[in-house]
Amino acid sequence: MTTTDTADLSISEAADLVRKRKLSPIELTEACLERIAALDARVRAFITVTREDAMAGAQQAAAAIAGGNYKGPLHGIPIALKDLFDTAGVRTTAGSKILRERVPTEDAEATARLKAAGAIILGKLNMHEFAFGATGLNRHYDGTHNPWGLDRMSGGSSSGSGAAVAAGMALGALGTDTGGSIRIPSSLCGVTGLKPTYGRVSRRGVVPLSWSLDHVGPIARTAADAALILKAIAGRDAGDETSSEEPVPDYAKTLADTRLKRLRIGVPDSFFFDNVDAECLEAIRAALFLLRDMKAQVDEVSLPHLAEVSAAVTAIMLPEALAYHRRWLAERPDDYGEDVRGRLELALLYPAVTYVEAKRLRTLVSEEWRASVFDRFDLLAVPTTPVAAPPLDDDGLQATLTLTRFTGAFNLTGLPAISIPCGFTSAGLPIGLQLVGRWWEEATVLRVAHAYQQATDWHKRTPAL
């Protein structure tokens, strides 16, 4: 097997080879590090590459597996982390100048759980500064370029996470999602990204943006890979009071049933299909037709309060972000990028009553969707973004507003949502389909995404870098 072939394996494929001792974690890690060395000067997916630590971890994994101590499907698998996950002894910058030299003494809980599962950490991934934007542009670290078109945005804020997986620099990655920041780069980079239910994964040791909207989740090539990562990182953490005691299924086992008969998929009758690029709309409709051909019931559904959701997300996100940044904003305003500083300054104008009303609306929307939508439907299916990857020189604010239009509602409600590739534009840019499930039913979301990927090959395509 060539180095190129090795770096393009899915986690599931690589894990099977590692388990059978047909592929060494050392070979696998070397392949990813070689890909990083060859491509990252152009893609800019990484802020920090931990080459020596990764190779040491790969050697330890290889020795353990050779000795019969195989931990499971992530053992010996190279994975990278968005650079706001704390890593003991390795800097965590949050994509900022302010934290450029910060070196944590402990791992984030999600980092620790990946390591406990045997994963090899390749390094820390580029991102929108402090996760506060959807473009992936970052004046401090030269924003990430999309592997499918280096003059295109990778999407944010988990820009390096999406780009690294798409380019074969890592077999999987962790990202965070406050208004779409896992799903947007997954859509624009042609990979699979899952935002779990709020509280499913601990956020302890993750630099916050908005603590009541932040979610931690995986980005990988396939839904099957995302299932493996989620299983490793999900579950109650006593150190994070927002993490849930809800039982964690064996997601990989739930993928076996690819039958969609009697599965009910709702397609919103407004908003999500307004002002969508024609090629994106065509790809989404084709995906819906395929799901119907696979015997799922696909019907229109009305989602209450959609017109109010976007403003509510903003009214919660901005004040919560300001609470974290207020001292730095007063003392070091020039150390922020203009876009992030502008959003924090805007947050100063939000009265407390607006924040409280937005929180009340979140409760109302969740209750009404539970009663009037998810009593009838198992999933919702919508576009992830209304456009494919915009040019890097597009207006950043307008691009952010456009890219987050179809994702923020599911942060407000905390519902699990996945983006999977469902086509390409005539310019060769990926298009993403978003599937949204009931609270705590990531297993259903992953199962349907996996069934779709078994019937298509969009997720198997790789950029010609």
Image (spheres, rainbow, N blue to C red):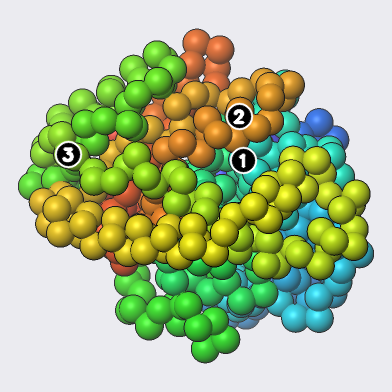
Q: Is residue 62 above or below residue 273?
A: below
- As drawn, which residue projects farthest toward the bottom? 238
Q: Is residue 348 above or below residue 233?
A: above
In primary-sequence order, the first of circles 2 and 3 is: 3
Q: The disc labelled 2 sits on which kind of residue?
A: Ala
Q: Gap between marks 2 and 3, in whole Å?
A: 28 Å
Q: Residue at x 49, y 24 (%)?
A: 387
- For the C terminus, which image quadrant? top right
**Image position, residue 8 (x, y; %):** 60, 40
Q: Is residue 168 above or below residue 232?
A: above
Q: Secondary structure at mark 3?
A: strand
Q: Is residue 392 above or below residue 123?
A: above
Return the mark for residue 402: none
For disc 3, the marked residue is 301
Return the mark for residue 134: 1
In primary-sequence order, the first of circles 2 and 1 is: 1
Label 3 Cα crowd, 10 Å radius (few <14 / some 14-19 / many 20+)? some
Q: Gap between marks 1 and 3, in whole Å?
A: 28 Å
Q: Residue at x 21, y 26 (%)?
A: 289
Q: The disc labelled 3 sits on which kind of residue?
A: Val
Q: In the displayed structure, does residue 46 sit left or right of residue 351? A: right
Label 1 Cα crowd, 10 Å radius (few <14 / some 14-19 / many 20+)? many
- For the N terminus, which image quadrant? top right
Please tell me which residue lies in front, 370 or 172: 370
Q: Are marks 1 and 3 in contact (CB under 8 Å)?
A: no
Q: Gap between marks 2 and 1, in whole Å?
A: 8 Å
Q: Residue at x 51, y 46 (%)?
A: 180
**Image position, residue 95 (x, y; %):** 78, 52
For disc 2, the marked residue is 399
Q: Secondary structure at mark 1?
A: loop
**Image position, residue 315 (x, y; %):** 52, 54
